[in-house]
Image: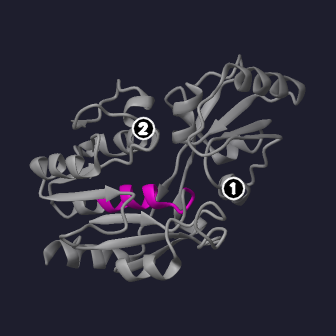
Amino acid sequence: MVIGGSTLGGSGKTPLAIACAKHARSLGHRVAFVGHAYRARPETSRVVAATDDVDVVGDEALVAFHALSPLGIPVVVAPTRQAALDHALSLADVAIVDGVAQTHPVRAHLALLALDAHSPWGAGACPPAGDLRAPERALLEVCDRVVVVEPAHLLSRGAHLEGTLVPWDALRGRSIALWTSVARPRRILEHLASHGVIPRLVVAHADHASVSTRDRALAIQQARVERVDMWLCTAKCTLRTGLYLGDTPVATLEHELQLEQSLSYALQTALEG
């Protein structure tokens, strides 16, 4: 099963792929997850471990590891996608591939295309004019089903701070700053606003951006000026900050994509076919 995104980041494909892997596991299948090692350099085909460096296996593969390892689902990366898929299929009978719209010459049993609800086709053009992975028609032709990722599909109880959950009602009373290294920080801001949390400070970097010493120092200075008492990051962004932004604690937002019933049924049908 493969899950692609319409745009170069921000379509919600990785949360969707993680949700699909969890659902397949709940149906009793042995599942392996092929991670998206974007901007990383895995030297060999391997299963991701908790101690792996983000620059070796990729931030999204590490996010998938933390979400899936409690369920016994290995996350695999490799120098090539084919090598990672081959390794995954040697470990399981179902492979969930993050970041691929289709496979060739053998087609995937189910190919999903993730679209962001507010900006499904991004800038409406392929690079360098826009951020589409391929022309809209081509993406639709190779995929079996379009999945629109809505903010309402994201479930969250709050944020984790040093292993303790800080619920939304406690976050509303804090002076919050948000650090992002994602394609569409607007989606996170809308998610926070839906829970009544409005950050006093927002520091937004490019998708997958690494944190430089200057970036960190500037953010720490801005937080002091704004009297911030907590930073919020997504799980992916936390991997980049290293949970350190000065003396101000950094909490990781909890969120999980919930599959619609019709999609859950489509996955079950494909897995049983």
Task: Say which residue appears at 78% left-offset and 44% top-offset.
Answer: 199
Image coordinates for residue 36, horizontal then vertical, percent: 38, 48
Residue designated by label 2:
58
- Crowd class of label 2 (few under 14; some 14 to 19; many from 20; radius 10 Å): many
Query: Where on the picture, by quarter, is residue 76?
Result: top left
Q: Nearer the viewer, mark 1 or mark 2?
A: 2
Q: Is residue 231 left or right of residue 3?
A: right
Which part of the image, by quadrant, shows the N terminus?
Answer: bottom left
Image coordinates for residue 215, horizontal then vertical, percent: 72, 26
Query: Where on the picture, by quarter, is residue 37?
Result: top left
Instruction: Tell whether label 2 touches label 1 (CB within 8 Å).
Output: no
Mark 2 is on which residue type?
Gly
Residue designated by label 1:
195
Q: Main secondary structure of the magenta part?
A: helix
Task: Say which residue appears at 45% left-offset and 60% top-offset.
Answer: 13
Q: Earlier in the sequence, mark 1 or mark 2?
A: 2
Residue 25 makes an appearance in the image: no
Per the image, is 20 magenta?
yes
Mark 1 is on which residue type?
His
Task: Say which residue appears at 60% left-offset and 65% top-offset.
Answer: 151
For residue 166, the mark is: none
Image coordinates for residue 4, horizontal then vertical, percent: 41, 64
**Residue extent of the magenta highlight:** 9-21
Q: Nearer the viewer, residue 53 or 197?
A: 53
Q: CA distance from mark 1 to mark 2?
A: 30 Å
